[in-house]
């Protein structure tokens, strides 16, 4: 199973955001553009803003639910992907 970029939660712990490498590279380039005072892609900043905001889970969101962190073992970690 491939875990996608987006909200993730271990058991009943606080939710967070997982960022896949390909998405992380894109957001790295957006951040580099900001810090270098280059023109910044509005789309890139909006995507990053939405991704970070997705750590605040709402009932209408798809969330990767995981076992409690201490129970996770490699690929058996992901329990289900469901709406909360």
Image (tube, rainbow, N blue to C red):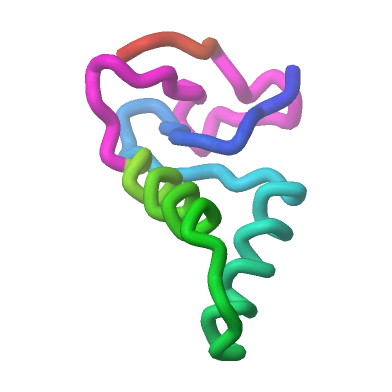
Q: Is residue 4 left or right of residue 79?
A: right
- Rendered image quadrant of residue 74: top right
Answer above or below: position of 70 versus 39. Answer: above
Q: Position of residue 78 (x, y in %)?
A: 60, 20
Q: Position of residue 76 (x, y in %)?
A: 69, 19
Q: Nearer the viewer, residue 2 or 61?
A: 61
Q: Nearer the viewer, residue 51 or 66?
A: 51
Q: Position of residue 16 (x, y in %)?
A: 41, 44
Span colored in magenta: 56-79
Q: Position of residue 24 (x, y in %)?
A: 66, 56
Q: Which residue is rendered at x = 75% and y = 48% of the image?
A: 22
Q: Which residue is rendered at x = 30% and y = 14% of the image?
A: 84
Question: Which quadrant: the N terminus?
Answer: top right
Q: Nearer the viewer, residue 36 or 9?
A: 36
Q: Which residue is rendered at x = 53% and y = 11% of the image?
A: 80
Answer above or below: position of 18 versus 71. Answer: below
Answer above or below: position of 10 versus 24. Answer: above
Answer above or below: position of 55 versus 52. Answer: above
Queried whether the magenta region covers residue 77, the answer comes back as yes
């Amino acid at each position: 199973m491939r875990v996608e970029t987006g909200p993730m939660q271990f058991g009943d712990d606080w939710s967070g955001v997982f960022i896949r490498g390909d998405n992380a590279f894109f957001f790295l380039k957006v951040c580099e553009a900001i810090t270098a005072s280059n023109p910044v892609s509005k789309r890139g900043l909006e995507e990053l803003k939405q991704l970070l905001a997705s750590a605040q889970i709402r009932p209408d969101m798809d969330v990767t639910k995981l076992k409690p962190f201490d129970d996770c073992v490699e690929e058996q970690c992901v329990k289900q992907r469901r709406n909360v």
